[in-house]
Amino acid sequence: MDPATLVPLALAFGVLIGAGVTVVIFFAARRGQDAADVVNTAVPDGVDQVLDTLESAGVVIDPSNTVVKASPGALAFGLVWNRALVHPELISMVDKVRRTGEPITKEVQLARGPIGEASIYLWVRVARLGARYVLLIAEDRTEGYRLEEVRRDFVANISHELKTPIGAVGLLAEALVSAKDEPEQVKKFAKRLTKESERLAKITQEIIQLSRLQAADALTKPALVDVDSVLALAVDQNRVAADSHGIHLVSGGDEAYVYGDEALLVVALHNLVANAIQYSPDNSRIGIGVSNVDGIVEIAVTDQGVGIPDDEKDRVFERFYRSDPARSRNTGGSGLGLSIVKHVAQNHGGDVRVWSQPGKGSTFTIRLPEASPATAASLGAAQ
Ligand code: ADP
């Protein structure tokens, strides 16, 4: 191409690109302005300040259903887009209030965003604001609904978990009656009956324990607890089981105190030691150690047992979770033990962690905030 045609062509091309960029900048600026308007448009006196102080979402809508003011919360919940309410449910509430003049309060479930299946649950109140505007206030209730879901699952799980041993007890009782003339069979069924009833008693006790722990988020009357005595009691309770498998329990470590409930801490540590015994080979060693570093007391239970695969490490703390149901059932496990440990740790302001390598062993560590007896005494709070 000769330079005489190339120059005008390049010029025209340059003008075209320039125009394109200008249009893009213009629309971007307008969108930005729109967003700012939604947040800043002038509304009746005082409403601005009220919306700004609200923790919940607030939206003011004019007679053409245009959003003239939205609090940051309303934008964060995705209630407003392009100066309009996004969800038809909310628009129909606004229309109704405008028609009837009566305020409406309603709990609604809305899509969390334009994609995905997640929902948010909002408590929504819509009322007229002067003669011209309508005000919509929304509070997030999603957390409450989630807890309710968890509770429902829990009840379903319990029914399922109890049904199995109860069914087994019934069947074994029938078998016992039919085998009444065969002493060996009677002995066998009676033994299994005892085992199932023990399992039933254990699950019931653990469910009650767990429910109590969940009901109380924090301990009401924490006392100063000597971790050493928690260790001694938990180890003592597991001594017979350990001895019967030739397992050596070794305990010790730093001196430490925490605020809490000694009985609950013993239950938690008992569960960890009982698991360590359950999932370890005969004649192995289990260490129960305490360390007290930088205000955190760590109680670690280390075994040389079967270990836990990586993808199951988080799940073992879930209620009724067992990595190998068949094996766990044989060992009388309910899948609630670690869930109880987690709740006890949480109620004491701490947590529980696991390190594990399949085939090598596991370490479960309860971490709790340290209590200093000296400080407690100086404040007159030692017990
Ligand atoms: P369970 O009553 O079945 O032992 P837990 O809640 O105490 O229930 O434990 C959940 C699951 O975590 C167990 O079924 C087991 O698979 C796994 N687990 C717990 N502790 C250990 C451990 N020390 N070593 C290997 N696996 C363990």
Image (spheres, rainbow, N blue to C red):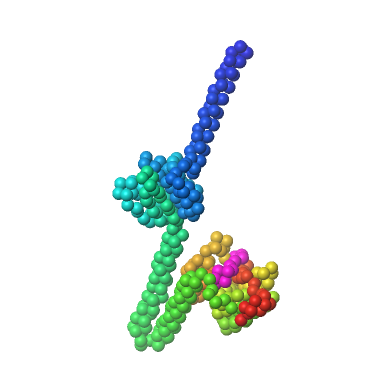
Q: Give the residue displayed 56% in from the left and 25% down from the top.
A: 18
Which residue is more in the foreground, 10 or 79? 79
Residue 345 magenta: yes
Q: Residue furthest front?
A: 45
Q: What is the x, y in percent for residue 9?
A: 57, 17
Which residue is more in the foreground, 181 or 234? 234
Left or right, 367 with respect to 174, comes to right
Q: What is the x, y in percent for residue 342?
A: 54, 69
Q: Give the residue displayed 40% in from the left and 65% down from the top.
A: 152
Q: Give the residue displayed 61% in from the left and 11% down from the top.
A: 4
User: Disc count in the image?
Assistant: 0
Q: What is the x, y in percent for residue 43?
A: 44, 44
The correct choice, above or below, for 136 with respect to 338 in the image is: above
Q: What is the x, y in percent for residue 110?
A: 40, 51
The correct choice, above or below, for 125 with respect to 340 in the image is: above
Left or right, 148 with respect to 279, comes to left
Which residue is more in the foreground, 146 or 170? 146
Q: Residue furthest left?
A: 100
The correct choice, above or below, for 52 with respect to 143 in the image is: above
Q: Which residues are magenta?
A: 344-358
- Residue 335 in sight from this viewpoint: no
Residue 72 magenta: no
Classify residue 201 by image quadrant: bottom left
Locate the C terminus by quadrant: bottom right
Left or right, 217 with respect to 228, comes to left
Classify residue 163 by image quadrant: bottom left
Which residue is more in the foreground, 161 or 297? 297
- Residue 299 in sight from this viewpoint: yes
Locate the N terminus by quadrant: top right
